[in-house]
Amino acid sequence: MSAPEHSTGSELDPANGFENPGLGEHRPRKADIDDKADKKAERQTAALFGISIVGTIIALVAYFTLNDADPGDIAQIRQVNMWIGIGIFLAMIGIGLGAIHWAKTLMRDHEMVEDRHELRSSDEAREGAIQNLKDGVEDSGLGGPKRRSVLKGSLITALAVAPLAVLVPQIGNMGSDWNISKFRHTLWGPGVRLARDPDGALIKAADVTIGSVFHVIPDGLNDLDHHHLISEKAKAVVLLVRLDPADLKVQEGREDWSFDGIVAYSKICTHVGCPVALYEQQTHHLLCPCHQSTFDVSDGCKVVFGPAKRPLPQLPIAVDDEGYIVAQADFDEPIGPSYWDRLKGGDDTTAEEVSH
Ligand code: FES
């Protein structure tokens, strides 16, 4: 690579037969000829790297605030998540803009020409490449006569701390006490009445007409304190549907889990846990809005389409002496997605059940 000669007029390229317009006259930038402008550009670049450092600090502080946040306080969690996002954004954009500004204003500004050559570079070219690298370091200002110590320091610090905004949350989560057994048990149990979500009104079998759908919570859920209400509701929500008993394919071993065509299934999608709530009365299909997994309510809520791999867990129900619909027991398997460690931590689901 060599510095080109600047042409003032057209030249005929003998190889290609067209006129080579040549390079225009080189025009130095302000920072090339004015020491004040050079210093200003350096300060601006350092400030951008400084923004990156501040962004990293914001992300880390927000992350540690999140650890102390009340899990039931959704508004606070949203706000903290927003600050984590803002912090990471500033950390990344600061480095990016700083590097661009540095290249445009401070790195040496001269055109280079590289002639076409064989695919394998000659030994001289290879040595030249190494020399170019060295020149690049010098051009960048890191190895030149000017020390630019503030710039160097801010860049190195920004590069060193920026990964923390991403790594620290990952490392922090590795030690969390995540355990599938938390999903093994819900508020459902023998005799717990089914109530409407959200008002908690109890549901009689006579109220459920064919084709109707009820969003259901366990009776008593609304009496819990806010924190427990949120976490228990997230596990226990159920969809209650009544089909014509003639349309219902009763699953083997579940002959007494439904009542006169009334069936209840977990609303938590077995893909990644969105609430499944779109019921199509004609086809008896239940659709998850997140990634379109579709479950057949008339056939054990088996997956008929989409990325989910397991049917929705069924809640065994019956009707008590007063005509109210009650649960016979808790779900017989963990609700929600099929995590890889589904068999750990007190989960007694069999491997065969998981694979279905
Ligand atoms: S969460 Fe239901 S399909 Fe993905």
Image: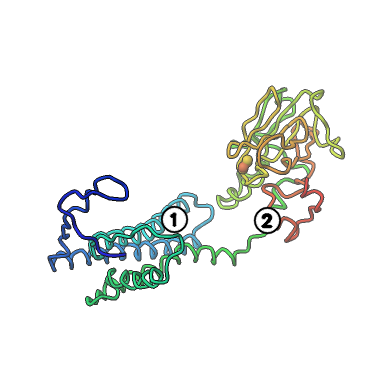
Q: Is residue 14 above or below residue 307?
A: below
Compare residues 275 and 13 and report the one nearer the observer. 13
Q: Name which quarter of the figure residue 62 lies in.
A: bottom left
Q: Which residue is mark 1?
A: 80
Residue 118 vs residue 236: left or right?
A: left
Q: Determine crowd level at label 1: few under 14, some 14-19, many 20+ residues with C-alpha closer than 10 A.
A: many
**How far across and how far down the image is residue 350, in percent?**
81, 53
| Residue 8 seen in this snapshot | yes
Q: Is residue 157 visible?
A: no
Query: Residue at (25%, 64%) from the top-left corner?
Result: 3
Q: Pick the quarter of the image with the N terminus.
A: bottom left
Q: Earlier in the sequence, mark 1 or mark 2?
A: 1
Residue 205 percent coordinates (x, y): 74, 28
Q: How far across and how far down the image is residue 109, in percent?
A: 23, 62
Q: Quadrant of residue 33?
A: bottom left
Q: Residue at the spot x=51%, y=57% of the render?
A: 70
Q: Secondary structure at mark 2?
A: helix
| Nearer-the-camera pick, 144 or 149 | 144
Q: Which of the 4 image quadrants contains residue 158?
A: bottom left
Q: Which residue is mark 2?
A: 182
Q: Amino acid at mark 2?
A: Lys
Examine the rendered structure and indicate whether residue 312 appears above or below residue 85: above
> Mark 1 belongs to which amino acid?
Val
Residue in the foreground of this view, choosing between 254 and 59: 59
Name the quadrant of the C terminus. top right
Q: Which quadrant does ligand 1 occupy?
A: top right
Residue 13 spot, x, y in % from top left: 27, 50
Q: Do residues under tags 1 and 2 come within 8 Å of each other at their CB atoms?
A: no
- Callout 1 secondary element: helix
Q: 10 Å neighbourhood of mark 2: few (<14), some, or many (≥20)?
A: some
At a point 21% along the width and 63% down the height, the residue shown is 41
